[in-house]
Image (cartoon, grey):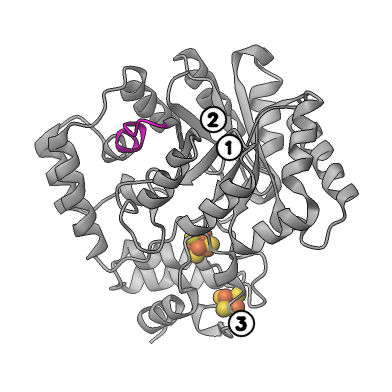
Amino acid sequence: MKKLGFGCMRFPLLDAEDNTSIDFPQVCQMVDLFLERGFTYFDTAYFYHGGTSEETVNRALVQRHPRDSFTLATKLPLAKLKEATAQEQADMFQLQLSRCGVEFFDYYLLHCIDDENYEIAQRLDSFAFVQQKKAEGYIRQAGFSFHGTPELLEEVLTQHPEVDFVQLQINYLDWENPKVQSRRCYEVAVAHHKPVVVMEPVKGGKLANPSPAVREMFAALDLNASPSSFAIRFAASLEHVFMVLSGMSSLEQVADNTGYMGDFRPVTPQEVAVLEQAAQQIQADGTIPCTACGYCTDGCPQRIPIPALFALYNRTLGQPGPMQKKEYREACAQGSPASACIACRQCEGACPQHLEVVEQLQRVAKVFED
Ligand code: SF4
Ligand code: SF4
């Protein structure tokens, strides 16, 4: 299997403010090109695109292509099962089969294991539930996506050696990041002999659009290679990684990614040295390391559009002009501005990047609302 997977959480949108307004004709073109070029792995989840990704995958992929021409991964939404019974967990699995329009999943993951979700999984015996579904033929490979510490990963893999694989956040910016600890998590997975799927190789698009200084560093290596190509090749070069997911948002991105990953070349020592320098530059630029996953917004009592505000802050490098301040007011119009935050910290509990959202919103309010 080629090492590039199609992440289905960043489909192109018809309305940038509405995460469910998926540009379906373009998604079909993207799926077709991806398959035509010999790639097969698709990764969706119950939560993606406000709950519409699984159904979109059904219509764009499952209903339009033979079942043996692709492999499909989705994830049990543990965060939604906080108060659920075992029967409701089983019902959720059935619902996902039906939303995706398949009779089995090639890969099925417990979604976003961290301290809180691990407790939910233990209470519901979710690992055993997934093994039972695997024995019944509804799942081929069972794993979990992970957003905790290396110590927690060690604990989970020791308690659940039955899992077939793990999905980790790995990219050249987070490799040594003390909050994400990509390298240490990867090493724990390897020590437990688990193959690894990589998520966020371009950190929610952040590494696809680096500063001009970083672009120049990449251009000196290869004028024709995109910034994303270095990020994805970095992750794919790790020996125990069998799949790198890219949340592609346009036909151009599919064409670019499948171009260099069709004939994959691992990164060279010279390229790794440049990526280390690039990581230092990006860390120093003061932007907020949000991946725009949107997990923080559902439970916000003030309905603050957190990822949109962080994106705007990053785009202006904290120095907005009048046009961007207008954009800010428009982004807040459906909910509340950053200054409305009441510091309940619900969002911080939901954030897989472990961001200090409250403090970051204070920075945003200061530059956009003063
Ligand atoms: S801390 Fe602020 S931004 Fe976060 S959920 Fe509470 S009100 Fe919303
Ligand atoms: S603040 Fe955290 S949870 Fe919210 S969109 Fe950004 S990365 Fe995701």
Whole-percent x, y for residue 18 in the image: 60, 53
Magenta-colored stretch includes residue 233: yes
* SS assignment at label 2: helix
Disc 2: CA contacts within 10 A as few (<14), some (14-19) or many (>=20):
some
Q: Is residue 2 above or below residue 195?
A: above
Q: Give the amino acid type for the residue marked by disc 2 in the picture.
A: Gln
Task: Determine the residue positioned at 43% across, 39% down.
Answer: 190
Which residue, given by chain and number where applicable, does mark 2 sit on?
26
| Spatial separation of the CA atoms under disc 3 and disc 2 | 39 Å
Q: Earlier in the sequence, mark 1 or mark 3?
A: 1
Q: Is residue 366 left or right of residue 28?
A: left
Query: Which residue occupies the foreground of this view, 275 or 204?
Result: 275
Which residue, given by chain and number where applicable, does mark 3 sit on?
344
Residue 23 shows which numbered tag? 1
- Magenta stretch in the rendered image: 232-240
Residue at mark 3: C-beta within 8 A of ligand 1: yes
Q: Is residue 52 above or below residue 316?
A: above
Q: Are marks 1 and 2 in contact (CB under 8 Å)?
A: yes
